Image (tube, grey):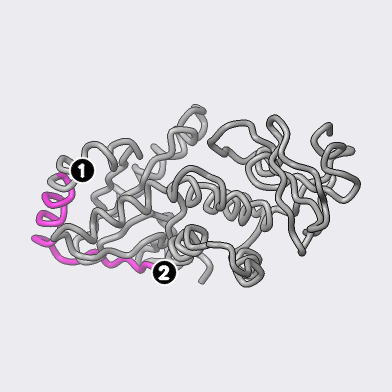
Amino acid sequence: MAALLYGGPRSVITGPAALRAYRLRVPGPDVIDILVPLTTRRQNAGSVRLHRTRQLPRVRRIGPVRYAEPARAVADAAQVLPSLDDVRAVVAEAIQKQLCNLAQLGLELERAGTRDMSRLRTALVDVREGSRSVAEIRFKERVQQSDLPRPQYNVFLRAANGTDIGEVDVWWADAGVSVEIDSQEYHFYRADWLRTETKRSRLLKHGIFPHNIAPVRVASDWDAIYWELKSSLEKGRQRPQLQIVAFEPAA
């Protein structure tokens, strides 16, 4: 609240500080980015960083505090976050939690004017192509750089008899091989872990060779992952193709 008092009556919190208020995980120092009218004469002070703008955003209030609406906060965060991967993670999480959508973020790109929005644009392309986390993006890049065949991403599997099998992150239809990039947070709770184990059993029941891969392995253990997948793909192609239909979950 003190930051808004310093910024003036029309000031709005944006960027990482706003996204943390929306309960997103955002890296970086606890600097508070404030949007203020173009005519504001104040300067940065302490942990408060002022951004003059002609386009003050629509506001969401949490108690007495004014925050930029999520799409604008994501766009502004993309300007100050340390890396492209940080931007990717924030965009993916904001969309997953339905704080904003691709269309709203696309509008922010159009409104950006002369600001460099290349990192946000790259992150939106990644999400639009189906990647929902930085680990998935890294996995896709690793596959593209290898001699592994190109799989489908983020598809729902259904058996020929109409039985729903479930959604997988990666799918090689000709070999019946799936991959899921396991979230560490997701597996913190026993109930979630049990759901994952039940799903794995269901995949195995339908003849699928499932691989559950921790995000840290994608970055640090790719050689081992590559050979695990290579072996499964070769084994899967030595049998008749599974009668399983894959389609996008929204279909």
The residue lying toward the viewer, choosing from 154 and 30, is: 30
Q: Which residue is mark 1?
A: 222
Tell me the SS state at disc 2: strand
Decide whether residue 168 is among the magenta residues: no
Q: Residue at x 28, y 42 (%)?
A: 218
Answer above or below: position of 114 versus 8. below
Question: Which amino acid does the dot numbered 2 rest on?
Answer: Phe
Q: Mark 1 packing: few (<14 Cα in 10 Å), some, or many (20+)? A: some
Q: Is residue 232 left or right of residue 177?
A: left
Q: Nearer the viewer, mark 1 or mark 2?
A: 1
Q: Residue at x 43, y 47 (%)?
A: 85
Q: Is residue 236 left or right of residue 139?
A: left
Where does residue 78 sit, x and y in percent of width and height? Answer: 55, 52
- Give the extent of the magenta segment: 228-247
Give the mark nearest the N terminus, 1 or 2.
1
* Disc marking residue 247: 2
